[in-house]
Image (cartoon, grey):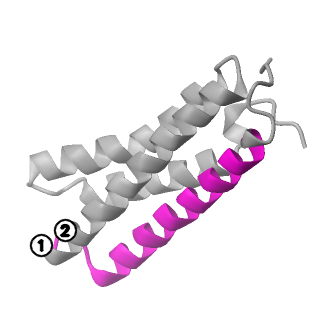
């Protein structure tokens, strides 16, 4: 199936869900440094997928996908601290943690798919 817009990419859709969840769950958090960092990391996931999609070759897109995957790992790591510091409940942690794992799995699968033809020009 051909993808015509980055919004069609399942990994981007899941990253968007994660970003929305992070913003909603941390909007009232008074630890502004923590809140800023986790929100930036969450948005970085979806933005790097979008930016990479607009690149010229699969090889460049793959590089952006690895950055997105790394940002997703950062969010996941910060979720453990958020739970430990009681910034979020166990239920909120579980939901956001699952979204981050789902996003990473989708991004990893897309990397594998694109790696089959890394020098293919993107239109």
User: Where is the C terminus found, in terms of image quarters?
Assistant: top right
| Quarter assignment of residue 116 | top right
Q: Quadrant of the N terminus?
A: top right
Q: Badge 2 local density, few (<14 within 10 Å), some, or many (20+)? A: few
**Which disc is residue 97 wearing?**
none
**Front residue of this view, candidates 44 and 59:** 59
Asked whether, in this view, residue 65 is left or right of residue 77, the answer is right
- Residue at 60%, 45% in the rendered image: 12
Asked if the residue under mark 1 is in contact with the one under mark 2, i.e. CB atoms within 8 Å, the reply is yes
Q: Is residue 57 above or below residue 75?
A: above
Q: Which residues are magenta?
A: 86-114
Q: Name the secondary structure under disc 2.
A: helix
- Residue at point 22%, 45% (across, down): 37
Give left or right: position of 5 versus 100: right
Residue 47 locus on image (x, y percent)? 49, 34
Kindly state the secondary structure of the residue where label 1 is placed: loop
Residue annotated with mark 2: 81
Image mark for residue 85: 1
Left or right of 73: which side holds 53?
Answer: right
**Image x and y of residue 48, in percent:** 50, 34
- Can you tell which quarter of the image residue 93 is in? bottom left
| Residue in view at x 71 percent, y 22 percent | 57
Q: Main secondary structure of the magenta part?
A: helix
Nearest-to-viewer mark from 2 and 1 = 2
Residue at 88% x, 37% y: name it. Answer: 2
Q: Is residue 42 inside the magenta stretch?
A: no
Decide: is 99 above or below 33.
below
State the separation of the CA atoms marked 2 and 1: 6 Å
Q: Position of residue 107 (x, y in %)?
A: 61, 51
Residue 89 inside the magenta-drawn segment: yes
Give the percent coordinates (x, y) of residue 71.
39, 47
């Amino acid at each position: 199936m051909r993808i015509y817009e980055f919004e069609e990419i399942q990994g981007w859709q899941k990253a968007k869900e994660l970003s929305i969840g992070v913003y909603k769950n941390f909007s009232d958090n008074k630890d502004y440094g923590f809140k800023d960092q986790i929100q930036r990391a969450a948005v970085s996931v979806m933005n790097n997928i979008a930016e990479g999609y607009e690149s010229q070759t699969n090889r460049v897109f793959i590089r952006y996908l690895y950055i997105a995957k790394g940002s997703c790992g950062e969010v996941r790591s910060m979720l453990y601290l958020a739970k430990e510091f009681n910034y979020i409940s166990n239920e909120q942690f579980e939901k956001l943690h699952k979204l981050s794992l789902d996003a990473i799995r989708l991004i990893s699968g897309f990397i594998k798919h694109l790696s089959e033809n890394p020098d293919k020009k993107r239109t």
